[in-house]
Amino acid sequence: MKLSLGPIQYFWDRDTVMQFYGRVAESSVDIVYLGETVCAKRRALNAADWLDIAARLAAAGKEVVLSTLVLVEAASELSRMRRIVDNGLYRVEANDMAAVNMLCSGKRFIAGPHINIYNGETLRLFADLGAFRWVPPLELGREAVAALQAVRPDGMETEVFAFGRLPLAFSARCFTARAHGLPKDSCEFRCADYPDGMELETRDGQQFLALNGIQVQSGYTANLVCELPTLQALKVDVLRLSPQSRGMETVIDWFRRAIDGSVDLDEAARALGDAVSTGPCNGFWHGVAGMDWLSEFVP
């Protein structure tokens, strides 16, 4: 089973991103997804920067994938997407059907978690279009993934989102800007003030969601390390870890050791709980509310 690192969901400055991927190059992840997937206004890095990072990671033995935007709103964004699709060096993760349309003319690609694949017929359709790996939608649980694994086409790899704040929804509005009384077009990039999202609580003070620009995330951090035996039994090929601003090397290390069987899963869950500032969740995997944590182990 391989480990992947998903695209950074947050708006980090250029130096932070460069330093982050310098550490990733020395880590044990097998696959690294690069690029801006949330907001087209975030341009701390340009195309040359991303390709430079990609080259460094490839030289370190990583499989590099370029990810596309989830929500496309302008012709200029389609133009940038076209440049990603036609990069000529690296595979592409499609997070929008516009990207799929550009890729299905002979290019092999990854169907990201924001592509709506919920049944075997759709999975076969995407295989016919050129997808060789897919990431199930984040709300799909164990039973649904098992059913799709039973009918997945030959050669199709399955990658499950296993750690990080879950990206739940996207909007044309910018929630972070609105929270600061600003319009989207004059947002002042307030999302940069929240390197792991702006936490949102209920009126009762319960941790609930996180705001990340136009994206709404889970308030808790998804963690499927305790589900590893089931994931292996289902023949899942890749586990995806989503970047966070602190402790990511620790997260990668504990997942790698858990996959290798060199640590107890409860011990790994405890260590991963210490590496994040939120509580854990795995409810979607068990077919209940996504914010729930179902495990005999309580971190």
Image: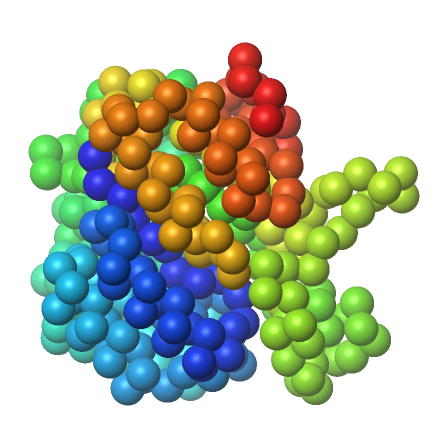
Compared to residue 276, the image places residue 230 above or below, namely above
Residue 11 vs residue 125, the one in the foreground? 11
Residue extending farthest top: 296
| Colouring method of the image | rainbow
* Number of numbered discs on residues: 0
- Is residue 37 left or right of 277 when viewed as pictured? left
Residue sitting at 35 percent across and 37 percent down? 255
- Is residue 128 left or right of 263 when viewed as pictured? left
Q: What is the x, y in percent for residue 24?
A: 31, 60
Compared to residue 22, the image places residue 159 above or below, namely above
Does any portion of residue 126 appear in the rendered image? no
- Is residue 147 left or right of 116 when viewed as pictured? left
Q: Quadrant of residue 254?
A: top left
Q: What is the x, y in percent for residue 128?
A: 15, 46
Residue sitting at 23 percent across and 53 percent down? 31
Q: What is the x, y in percent for residue 178?
A: 77, 70
Q: What is the x, y in percent for residue 137?
A: 43, 41
Residue 271 vs residue 5, the one in the foreground? 271
Q: Quadrant of residue 121?
A: top left
For the C terminus, give its image quadrant.
top right
Does any portion of residue 292 appear in the rendered image? yes
Compared to residue 255, the image places residue 11 above or below, namely below
Residue 281 vs residue 128, the one in the foreground? 281
For the N terminus, give its image quadrant.
top left
Residue sitting at 37 percent across and 76 percent down? 18
Residue sitting at 22 percent across and 41 percent down? 2
